[in-house]
Image (cartoon, grey):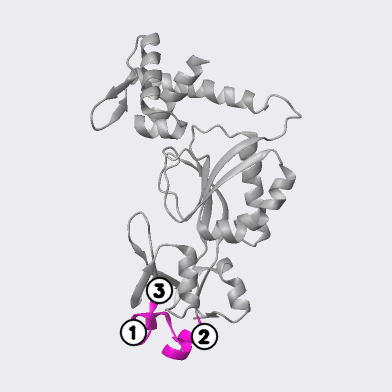
Amino acid sequence: MDRIVQMRAFARVVETGSFTKAADSMDLPKASLTRLVQALEARLRVQLLTRTTRKVTVTQDGAIYYERTMALLNELEAIDQGMLHENSKPRGRLRVDVTTLTGSRVLIPALPDFHERYPDVEIALGVSDRSIDLLVDNVDFVLRVGPVQDAGLVARRVGQILFCTCAAPSYIEKHGLPREPRDLDREPHQAVGYFSSRTGRVFPFVFHRGDERLEIEGRRRLDVNDSNAYVAAGLSGLGVVQLAKYAVEDHLARGELVPLFPEWHHNPIPVYLVYSPNRYVSARMRVFIDWVVETLARRGLGPT
């Protein structure tokens, strides 16, 4: 058992690039994790990691050992999950991270159905618009909107997001009805910006009409980085907003927001389930992924 714990500790250091982050992800004191790795190196009589005051890197021997270790740990995970038995039921705990609106408006309302089907699966659902690191944060997988930049991750397309540009009646009463997207760059109109928590970049409004494409910055007095706050800003009449249609469909139906620019549209944005290639895809992961695909399709958000 000690040998397995040592392997897991070493693997987490390789994946996170840090003894401190690895210890946090395993809920161990840093000193305890360090002793586990040192004991492993002493038993193998091989240096697996090179440590400096600034970073930890894996040696050539360590890289080979890591690949073999992950194969063994994944096999142990399969055994633990009962994957070798035909009648086994998915069980255990999943850590999943999703965007605020997808979590609060789509997945959480549908979760009673998942728990009814799989009562032995526990879910730790991180709901935020921040960008996370799967390995550092020790998450099984994340649901991401838009292109996946990291080629080292496995990304499965599971849906798409349709967008809507709209404004509150109070905004239109005060500023008038903008007739075309370029009006958002002109007085008296105002837009509400949405910026990345990671980079601080404000995303432009994007419009398509036939072969024509526009990117509009908009005249802005307010930028936010949270989806619920963005919806609230639109409802408060603070400016024109462009966001996922499913987030505001109820407000549109009640007349609390008014759709704009009917001749223009925003191309759908793909949604991906993303996980590490070294992550064993357990039974609980597989059924949750399938359920997410089914749930998005029921909401009209399935991939095309």
Mark 2 vs mark 1, foreground winner is 2
Q: Residues within 10 Å of mark 2 (few under 14, many from 20)?
A: some
Identify the residue at image location x=41%, y=23%.
Answer: 10
Identify the residue at image location x=24%, y=27%.
Answer: 52
Q: Is residue 6 left or right of residue 56?
A: right
Residue at far left of view: 53
Q: Residues within 10 Å of mark 1 (few under 14, many from 20)?
A: few
Give the CA distance from mark 2 to mark 1: 19 Å
Residue 173 inside the magenta-drawn segment: yes
Segment colored magenta: 168-192
Res 68 seen here: no
Residues tagged 2 and 3 counted as in contact (Cβ below 8 A): no
Image location of residue 58, percent across then percent down:
33, 25
Q: Which residue is mark 1?
A: 186
Q: Which residue is mark 3?
A: 192
Q: Which residue is mark 2?
A: 169
Q: Amino acid at mark 3?
A: Val
Q: Looking at the image, is 57 positioned above or below residue 298?
A: above
Element type at marker 3?
strand
Res 167 seen here: yes
Q: Looking at the image, is 191 positioned above or below residue 116?
A: below
Residue 159 inside the magenta-drawn segment: no
Q: Amino acid at mark 2?
A: Pro
Residues tagged 2 and 1 counted as in contact (Cβ below 8 A): no
Element type at marker 1?
loop
Q: To which quarter of the image does residue 122 belong?
A: top right
